[in-house]
Image: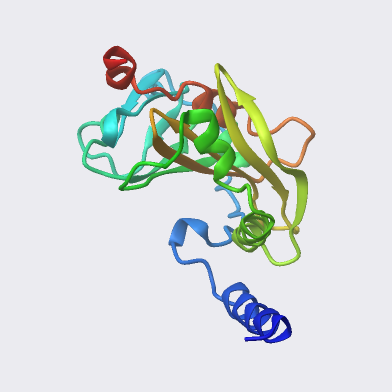
Amino acid sequence: MTDALRRGRAMLLLSYLLAIAPAHAEDAPEAIAEPAPDAIATPEAGDALPGPTVLRLDQGFVLDLPAGWVLEEADDDPGDATGRRVVRVVCRTPACARTQETCTLRLRTGPVEGADDAARLAGLHAAPLSRYFRLRAVLKSTSPGASIRRPIGPERFGPRDWIAVETEAAPRFKSGLFAETVIGGRYLGAICKTCETGPVRHESARALLASARRPAWSAAR
Protein backbone atom coordinates (compact mmCIF):
# COMPACT_ATOMS: atom_id res chain seq x y z
CA MET A 1 0.00 0.00 0.00
CA THR A 2 1.43 3.39 -1.01
CA ASP A 3 1.92 6.27 1.45
CA ALA A 4 -0.59 8.35 -0.47
CA LEU A 5 -3.23 5.64 -0.15
CA ARG A 6 -2.54 5.26 3.57
CA ARG A 7 -2.90 9.01 4.09
CA GLY A 8 -6.11 9.03 2.10
CA ARG A 9 -7.62 6.25 4.18
CA ALA A 10 -6.48 7.93 7.41
CA MET A 11 -8.12 11.22 6.40
CA LEU A 12 -11.33 9.39 5.45
CA LEU A 13 -11.41 7.67 8.84
CA LEU A 14 -10.68 10.96 10.59
CA SER A 15 -13.53 12.73 8.78
CA TYR A 16 -15.92 9.93 9.75
CA LEU A 17 -14.92 9.98 13.42
CA LEU A 18 -15.17 13.75 13.71
CA ALA A 19 -18.73 13.60 12.43
CA ILE A 20 -19.81 11.29 15.24
CA ALA A 21 -21.92 12.99 17.93
CA PRO A 22 -20.86 12.75 21.61
CA ALA A 23 -21.36 9.18 22.76
CA HIS A 24 -22.53 10.02 26.27
CA ALA A 25 -25.28 12.35 27.44
CA GLU A 26 -22.90 14.15 29.81
CA ASP A 27 -20.63 14.94 26.83
CA ALA A 28 -23.36 16.73 24.90
CA PRO A 29 -23.60 20.55 24.78
CA GLU A 30 -25.50 21.91 27.75
CA ALA A 31 -27.68 24.96 27.20
CA ILE A 32 -28.23 27.54 29.93
CA ALA A 33 -31.66 27.35 31.51
CA GLU A 34 -33.30 30.49 32.84
CA PRO A 35 -33.58 30.28 36.66
CA ALA A 36 -36.95 30.71 38.28
CA PRO A 37 -37.61 34.23 39.58
CA ASP A 38 -36.99 33.20 43.20
CA ALA A 39 -34.18 30.75 42.43
CA ILE A 40 -31.41 33.08 43.60
CA ALA A 41 -33.05 33.96 46.89
CA THR A 42 -31.13 33.15 50.05
CA PRO A 43 -32.32 29.84 51.53
CA GLU A 44 -34.47 29.95 54.62
CA ALA A 45 -32.84 29.06 57.95
CA GLY A 46 -34.54 25.67 57.91
CA ASP A 47 -33.26 24.90 54.42
CA ALA A 48 -29.55 24.85 55.17
CA LEU A 49 -27.37 23.76 52.28
CA PRO A 50 -25.26 20.62 52.73
CA GLY A 51 -21.77 21.21 54.08
CA PRO A 52 -18.61 19.71 52.62
CA THR A 53 -19.24 16.04 51.88
CA VAL A 54 -16.86 13.14 51.23
CA LEU A 55 -17.71 11.47 47.91
CA ARG A 56 -16.58 7.86 47.46
CA LEU A 57 -16.31 6.27 44.03
CA ASP A 58 -15.22 2.90 42.67
CA GLN A 59 -11.56 1.80 42.76
CA GLY A 60 -10.92 3.62 46.05
CA PHE A 61 -11.33 7.15 44.68
CA VAL A 62 -12.37 9.79 47.21
CA LEU A 63 -13.19 13.48 46.61
CA ASP A 64 -14.47 16.29 48.81
CA LEU A 65 -17.64 17.97 47.55
CA PRO A 66 -17.59 21.71 48.35
CA ALA A 67 -20.37 23.09 50.53
CA GLY A 68 -23.62 23.22 48.59
CA TRP A 69 -22.62 20.53 46.08
CA VAL A 70 -24.59 17.28 45.98
CA LEU A 71 -24.47 13.96 44.19
CA GLU A 72 -27.28 13.85 41.67
CA GLU A 73 -29.82 11.04 42.16
CA ALA A 74 -28.10 10.02 45.38
CA ASP A 75 -31.24 8.82 47.21
CA ASP A 76 -30.47 8.49 50.92
CA ASP A 77 -26.66 8.68 50.77
CA PRO A 78 -25.48 11.85 49.01
CA GLY A 79 -21.81 11.10 49.62
CA ASP A 80 -21.46 7.49 48.48
CA ALA A 81 -21.37 6.56 44.79
CA THR A 82 -19.67 3.20 45.31
CA GLY A 83 -20.63 0.83 42.52
CA ARG A 84 -20.83 3.57 39.91
CA ARG A 85 -18.12 4.59 37.44
CA VAL A 86 -19.88 7.70 36.11
CA VAL A 87 -21.41 10.22 38.52
CA ARG A 88 -22.70 13.76 38.22
CA VAL A 89 -22.40 16.30 41.03
CA VAL A 90 -24.37 19.55 41.02
CA CYS A 91 -23.95 22.87 42.83
CA ARG A 92 -27.08 23.93 44.74
CA THR A 93 -25.88 27.20 46.30
CA PRO A 94 -27.82 30.44 45.66
CA ALA A 95 -24.98 31.66 43.43
CA CYS A 96 -25.22 28.49 41.37
CA ALA A 97 -28.82 29.30 40.49
CA ARG A 98 -27.11 31.67 38.07
CA THR A 99 -23.89 29.79 37.21
CA GLN A 100 -25.55 26.33 37.07
CA GLU A 101 -22.28 24.53 37.77
CA THR A 102 -21.99 20.76 37.39
CA CYS A 103 -19.23 18.17 37.18
CA THR A 104 -19.41 14.69 35.68
CA LEU A 105 -16.74 12.31 37.00
CA ARG A 106 -15.81 9.21 35.03
CA LEU A 107 -13.59 6.21 35.77
CA ARG A 108 -12.31 3.53 33.40
CA THR A 109 -12.66 -0.17 34.01
CA GLY A 110 -9.02 -1.13 33.44
CA PRO A 111 -5.71 0.36 34.61
CA VAL A 112 -3.63 2.81 32.57
CA GLU A 113 -0.40 1.39 31.23
CA GLY A 114 2.92 3.03 32.08
CA ALA A 115 5.92 2.99 34.39
CA ASP A 116 4.38 5.39 36.90
CA ASP A 117 1.53 7.88 37.19
CA ALA A 118 3.53 10.70 35.59
CA ALA A 119 4.31 8.57 32.55
CA ARG A 120 0.72 7.29 32.38
CA LEU A 121 -0.68 10.82 32.49
CA ALA A 122 1.78 12.10 29.89
CA GLY A 123 0.88 9.19 27.63
CA LEU A 124 -2.85 9.93 27.57
CA HIS A 125 -2.48 12.48 24.76
CA ALA A 126 1.17 12.24 23.78
CA ALA A 127 0.38 11.63 20.11
CA PRO A 128 -0.64 14.70 18.05
CA LEU A 129 -3.65 12.82 16.67
CA SER A 130 -4.83 11.99 20.19
CA ARG A 131 -4.55 15.65 21.21
CA TYR A 132 -6.45 16.65 18.07
CA PHE A 133 -9.26 14.22 18.83
CA ARG A 134 -9.37 15.45 22.43
CA LEU A 135 -9.74 19.09 21.36
CA ARG A 136 -12.41 18.22 18.81
CA ALA A 137 -14.31 16.22 21.44
CA VAL A 138 -14.30 18.99 24.06
CA LEU A 139 -15.39 21.61 21.52
CA LYS A 140 -18.26 19.38 20.38
CA SER A 141 -19.19 18.77 24.02
CA THR A 142 -19.27 22.52 24.72
CA SER A 143 -21.41 24.06 21.96
CA PRO A 144 -21.58 24.82 18.25
CA GLY A 145 -19.06 27.58 17.61
CA ALA A 146 -17.14 26.98 20.86
CA SER A 147 -13.49 27.99 21.17
CA ILE A 148 -10.50 26.94 23.26
CA ARG A 149 -10.05 29.33 26.20
CA ARG A 150 -7.05 27.54 27.72
CA PRO A 151 -5.13 25.05 25.57
CA ILE A 152 -4.69 21.42 26.49
CA GLY A 153 -1.75 20.80 28.77
CA PRO A 154 -0.62 19.99 32.30
CA GLU A 155 -2.29 21.85 35.16
CA ARG A 156 -1.77 21.48 38.89
CA PHE A 157 -4.87 20.93 41.01
CA GLY A 158 -3.80 20.71 44.64
CA PRO A 159 -0.98 18.16 45.02
CA ARG A 160 -1.60 16.42 41.70
CA ASP A 161 -0.94 16.99 38.01
CA TRP A 162 -3.82 16.82 35.54
CA ILE A 163 -4.10 17.21 31.78
CA ALA A 164 -6.72 19.93 31.31
CA VAL A 165 -8.32 22.06 28.63
CA GLU A 166 -10.84 24.87 29.06
CA THR A 167 -13.43 25.93 26.51
CA GLU A 168 -15.44 29.07 25.84
CA ALA A 169 -19.02 28.38 24.79
CA ALA A 170 -21.17 30.23 22.33
CA PRO A 171 -23.87 32.44 23.90
CA ARG A 172 -26.61 30.54 25.76
CA PHE A 173 -24.38 27.49 26.36
CA LYS A 174 -22.13 26.44 29.23
CA SER A 175 -18.35 26.67 29.00
CA GLY A 176 -16.32 23.70 30.17
CA LEU A 177 -13.29 22.52 32.10
CA PHE A 178 -12.18 19.07 30.91
CA ALA A 179 -9.53 17.38 33.03
CA GLU A 180 -7.90 13.95 33.43
CA THR A 181 -5.49 12.45 35.93
CA VAL A 182 -4.10 9.07 36.94
CA ILE A 183 -3.77 7.96 40.57
CA GLY A 184 -2.15 4.63 41.34
CA GLY A 185 -2.54 3.54 37.74
CA ARG A 186 -6.25 4.34 37.60
CA TYR A 187 -7.89 6.98 35.44
CA LEU A 188 -10.16 9.77 36.67
CA GLY A 189 -11.75 12.17 34.18
CA ALA A 190 -13.93 15.20 34.81
CA ILE A 191 -16.24 17.36 32.70
CA CYS A 192 -17.17 20.50 34.63
CA LYS A 193 -19.50 23.08 33.11
CA THR A 194 -20.69 26.55 34.09
CA CYS A 195 -22.47 29.50 32.51
CA GLU A 196 -20.16 31.88 34.41
CA THR A 197 -18.44 34.14 31.86
CA GLY A 198 -16.07 36.14 34.07
CA PRO A 199 -12.30 35.71 34.19
CA VAL A 200 -12.56 33.60 37.36
CA ARG A 201 -14.62 30.48 36.83
CA HIS A 202 -14.60 26.81 37.82
CA GLU A 203 -13.18 27.71 41.25
CA SER A 204 -15.33 25.16 43.06
CA ALA A 205 -14.69 22.58 40.35
CA ARG A 206 -10.93 23.04 40.69
CA ALA A 207 -11.21 22.66 44.47
CA LEU A 208 -13.22 19.47 43.97
CA LEU A 209 -10.63 18.00 41.59
CA ALA A 210 -7.76 19.09 43.83
CA SER A 211 -9.18 16.88 46.58
CA ALA A 212 -9.10 13.68 44.49
CA ARG A 213 -7.21 10.82 46.14
CA ARG A 214 -7.12 7.04 46.63
CA PRO A 215 -6.37 6.47 50.33
CA ALA A 216 -6.43 2.67 50.11
CA TRP A 217 -3.89 2.73 47.27
CA SER A 218 -1.65 5.18 49.16
CA ALA A 219 -1.70 3.01 52.28
CA ALA A 220 -0.71 -0.05 50.24
CA ARG A 221 2.37 1.56 48.69
Residue 207 image position (x, y, % from top left): 55, 23
Closest to the observer: 153 or 123?
123
Q: How many marks?
A: 0
In the image, farthest residue toward the front:
1
Query: Left of 159 or right of it: where is 64?
Result: left
Residue 177 image position (x, y, % from top left): 62, 42
Q: Is residue 92 above or below residue 35?
A: above
Query: Left of 63 or right of it: where is 131?
Result: right
Query: Left of 112 or right of it: where is 12?
Result: right
In the image, farthest residue toward the top:
219
Residue at the image position 46 percent from the left and 32 percent from the top: 115
Residue at the image position 42 percent from the left and 42 percent from the top: 113
The reply to whether residue 40 is visible in this rendering is no
Q: Quadrant of the N terminus?
A: bottom right
Q: Quadrant of the C terminus?
A: top left
Residue at the image position 59 percent from the left and 79 percent from the top: 13
Residue 147 image position (x, y, % from top left): 77, 55
Q: Is residue 43 above or below residue 8?
A: above
Q: How is the image coloured?
A: rainbow
The reply to whether residue 172 is visible in this rendering is yes
Residue at the image position 78 percent from the left and 45 percent from the top: 149
Closest to the observer: 135 or 145?
135
Q: Is residue 12 above or below residue 27?
A: below
Query: Left of 98 or right of it: where is 87?
Result: left
Residue 94 image position (x, y, % from top left): 55, 31
